Image: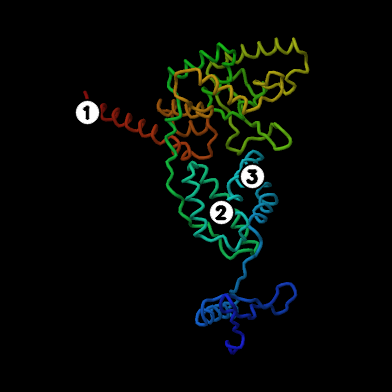
Amino acid sequence: MDFDKILKHGKKGFYFRTDVGKDPVTGKRTQKSFGPYKNKAEAKKAFIEIKNHVNEGSYFEPSDQLFEGFITEWFETIYKTQVHVSTAESRKYMIEKRVIPYFKKRPLKGMTKQLMAKFIADQANDGCSAAYIKNLYSLLNQAFDTAVDWKLIKENPIKGIKKPSVKSGNKTDKTWGKEEINAFLLMASERGVTVPYILSINTGLRRGELLALTWKDLDWENGTIRIDKSVYRVKGEGLKIGPTKTENSNRTIPLADYVINVLRQHKAVQESIKDYYGEGFNPLDLVFPSENGNIMDPDNFSRQFRKIVEKLQVKKISLHGLRHTHATILMKAGVNAKVVADRLGHSRVQITLDYYTHTDEEVQKQTSEILAGFLHNE
């Protein structure tokens, strides 16, 4: 083919139009225009590369579909059907508030590795935590893998992008010691809301798991509590009780006699309230219902916790910090990491060790001192 015959010169540079293969549906030859190029040599080089790809059968034309439309379709048809409802809600918020506004009206074929690297770096600079960036990366990685499968793009632009180093902080910085726990429980007692916090500190339950507990989940005879559900919010539908996030979150936790006794007293008080309001009160038989007997809003529970903490001269931690406090106390006491992982509902022991590395190092040092004392002291 005489390249000069198909080469055109316009105001912005050089262009050419050539065959790029057959339409997979109609079987007809298809042509596409390319350019502009700065000069004839650059245009000819591009033409040769394109023709080589066409002849080898490796030519690929990325989709002009907008990224926003693709990721919305992918989320609704693929991702949303494969994860827990609460996870889907949080990831949808992530897409709508952080991902789509960043890329705006960019087409899929414009999503380059360079752009992905900048996006991830910008999130770190914007104060996002290491865990948040990890979730962002995973979300986009899954989406772009699907785009490749759907033959919308040739390769996943975020795969292989190095995530920036973000200091996630030490979990022990988000926990309380004995004095802080006692000070908090004393003030919570004055407000008549001690029991859920006692159970939280003694079990490490997530707030959704705690608020989904029913009295049937308690085995009074064996002194255990069964966790197999959680409270979550569905946009437009309100609060729901459904399965826990993962199979590993389903677990049975032994309770200390002290905690069992506290729960017995709590049940007696709740039954007197039910006698006053009638059988319609707390129809789900929740251990910690709201004041009107319905599912307690997890956000209200967190708000209640913060209000108590603000009145105290203690380290400011979140409600989730009670879960970290539970784990840290056990790890410092030398409890086997596998036992701690099982109580927390972690799928792997390594997750627990990664979370509480500093505490584990303290335990390891204590162990070394014990061993040295045994070997070298008479």
On residue 141, the disc is: 2
Q: Label for residue 92?
A: 3
Q: Nearer the viewer, residue 165 or 323?
A: 165
Image height of 146 relative to 164, above or below: below
Q: Amino acid at mark 1?
A: His
| Quarter location, residue 167 | top left
Please report whichever mark, 2 or 3, sits nearer to the chain's N-terminal start: 3
Name the residue rendered at 61%, 88% in the picture. 5
The disc, 1 or 3, on the residue closer to the chain's N-terminal end is 3
Q: Amino acid at mark 3?
A: Lys
Which quarter of the image is occupied by the C terminus?
Answer: top left
Q: Nearer the viewer, mark 1 or mark 2?
A: 2
Q: Looking at the picture, how far across and down is residue 175, in whole percent?
A: 45, 27
Q: Is residue 220 above or below residue 107?
A: above
Residue pictured at 57% horizontal, 30% vertical: 206
Dot 1: what SS? helix
Q: How is the image coloured?
A: rainbow
Using the numbered discs, state the Cα–Cα distance from disc 1 to disc 3 in whole angstroms. Answer: 59 Å
Find numbered disc 3 in the image and state the secondary structure of the residue it sits on: helix
Say the numbered circle drawn on residue 376: 1
